[in-house]
């Protein structure tokens, strides 16, 4: 049980709902207004593109503008 839910039951429900939505998308008998909305990303965008926008030029710089690896080395040296 996960926070009061049966993991297997939740997985089965999600799989069933996904299959039902997928079936409706391809069913010509289902009217357009009753079909689920299908998300489509903009042409030419990928997960890799959006991830790179956040990381370009930052390397290992932390939010406080310090270099993570330098800080890690410094703290490890202090502990020895």
Image (cartoon, grey):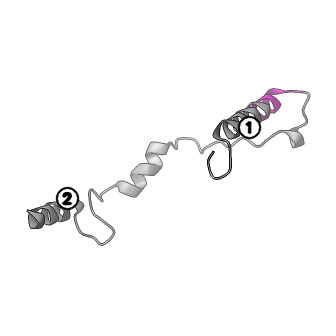
Numbered disc 1: secondary structure = helix
80 vs 63, left or right, is left
Between 45 and 9, which is closer to the camera in this rendering? 9
Magenta stretch holds residue 22: yes
- The quarter holding residue 65 reads bottom left
Q: Earlier in the sequence, mark 1 or mark 2?
A: 1
- Exactly how many numbered labels are in the figure? 2
15 vs 66, left or right, is right
User: Residue visible at 19% across and 65% down?
Assistant: 71
The quarter of the rendered structure image containing the N terminus is top right
Q: What is the spatial separation of the Cα atoms under label 1 and label 2, in whole angstroms?
A: 44 Å
User: Residue visible at 16% across and 65% down?
Assistant: 75
Q: From this viewpoint, which residue is outermost toward the bottom? A: 64
Does residue 54 lie above or below 15 as drawn? below
User: Residue visible at 72% across and 41% down?
Assistant: 38
8 vs 24, left or right, is left
The residue labelled by disc 2 is 69
Between 31 and 65, which is closer to the camera in this rendering? 65
Magenta stretch holds residue 41: no
Majority secondary structure of magenta residues: helix
How many residues crowd around disc 2 within 10 Å: few (fewer than 14), some, or many (20 or more)? few
- The quarter holding residue 41 reads top right
The x and y percentages for residue 14 are 71, 38
The residue labelled by disc 1 is 13
Magenta span of residues: 21-28
């Amino acid at each position: 049980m996960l926070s009061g839910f049966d993991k297997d039951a939740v997985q089965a429900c999600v799989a069933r709902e996904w299959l039902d939505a997928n079936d409706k998308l391809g069913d010509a008998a289902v009217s357009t207004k009753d079909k689920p909305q299908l998300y489509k990303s903009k042409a030419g965008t990928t997960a890799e593109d959006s991830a790179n926008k956040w990381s370009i030029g930052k390397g290992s710089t932390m939010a406080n503008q310090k270099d993570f690896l330098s800080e890690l080395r410094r703290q490890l040296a202090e502990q020895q």
